[in-house]
Amino acid sequence: MSLSTTISSELSRKPRICMPTFSAFARNAFRAGLYEAQDILAACDDVDVIHLKPSKGFAAKARWVRRFAYHNVSRMLTSLNPGLLPVRLTRDYDLFMLVCPLWSDVWYANAVQGWQDHCRTSICWIDELWLHEVPELKYWLLPILSKFDHVIIGTIGSGKPLNDALGHPCHEMLGGVDSIRFSPYPKSPERVIDFYSVGRRLERIHRCLLKWAGDKKAFYVHDTLDNSGDRETLDHRQHRDLYANIAKRSRFFGVAPGKVNTLEGRQGQGDIGFRYFEGSAAGTVLVGQPPGGCDLFRLHFDWPHSVIETQSDGSDTVEVISKLSAEPERIHEISCRNAEEALRRHDWVYRWKEILGIAGLNPRPAMDTREKRLAELADVAKLDREKVRGVHR
């Protein structure tokens, strides 16, 4: 077969995955990581990306549907479209893939008419669903999820209770990151930012860092706007590019368990938030606390100094980063190792390969191509680390 014939065959291949996205109307900053994941699947497979759009009066209708369905024991309202323009499928797919940052997003599936008839297998991926929420959502979430063949949960520890309540296969899935976007390699930029803090934070730690930055004339980058879930991005790709570019120019990166400033939200449940993946991929030194009681974190972040731990109240944060700042070779080695491990283990493409396996689908060649590029960059990071170690041996 000639090259031109091969290219023509690739271009004429029909999409085998149907994947709705909410990026046209749900632009909250916290959603951008999973939109990034969807972009990677779309680039590596044959995907029909269905851009759902709101109809007139969407916000009011969505609030009404949620309010009544949440308490409606008849479960009849769970099939309603919550104010989105309907989309009717007219062809068949191997997989219907619904990616939901929040459990309440599952409702948007009702806007895609005929997906059960036209899709051989269906998977719903919910990133955030806390253990204590499962029994509270039995009247409307479980009936919707029962339509799917498989459910994936990104909140570690919630999979088994949901499996027991639903009676359907439920899988727990780690988060991830576009490791190529966040990687400082192959040409590492200068790390001109001393400490980078994004998202939720503990106010005491923030005040200590502000004082440290003022005393040492350090560059401390942090959010100055209210960190509520209502903050929206104009474009999720530009948002991720800016985030990555700041992170890969930072020496230290603050990390903490999910919902760190609203502990009642997780009620002691351990979880691996996206920041651990993002900060590692950018080659920063992660400073803070690992997720408490989470064995999966110790399994998947098992390399030396993956997180430089501080007291949970942050009382020693400044002391820890000051001591590390006096050891630039150690900082560089930690940085290289973090970037390397993220490239080898935590790119979104590895998660998608797991999901395709659940669906019974083989990965397309583009996924192998991406993995090869990840391995090349990881080797560059490893060489960088070994050079420093050799010089100072």
Image (cartoon, rainbow, N blue to C red):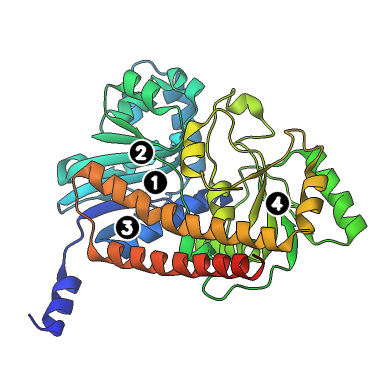
Circle nearer the viewer, 3 or 2: 3
Query: Marks 3 and 1, how far apart in space?
Result: 16 Å
Kindly identify which residue carries mark 4: 197
User: Which residue lies most toward the front here?
Assistant: 393
Which quarter of the figure is the N terminus placed in? bottom left
Circle nearer the viewer, 4 or 1: 4
Q: Foreground residue, 96 or 250?
A: 250
Q: Is residue 21 above or below residue 163?
A: below
- Left or right: 10, with 27 as reference point: left
Circle nearer the viewer, 3 or 4: 4
- Left or right: 374, with 202 as reference point: left
Kindly identify which residue carries mark 1: 84
**At numbered mark 3, what does the secondary structure look like: helix, strand or loop?**
strand
On the image, which quarter does residue 134 sit in? Answer: top left
Kindly identify which residue carries mark 3: 49
Q: Are marks 1 and 2 in contact (CB under 8 Å)?
A: yes
**At numbered mark 4, what does the secondary structure look like: helix, strand or loop?**
loop
- At label 4, the amino acid type is Ser
**At numbered mark 1, what does the secondary structure look like: helix, strand or loop?**
loop
User: Which residue lies most toward the left here?
Assistant: 1
- At label 3, the amino acid type is Val
Q: Are marks 3 and 1 in contact (CB under 8 Å)?
A: no
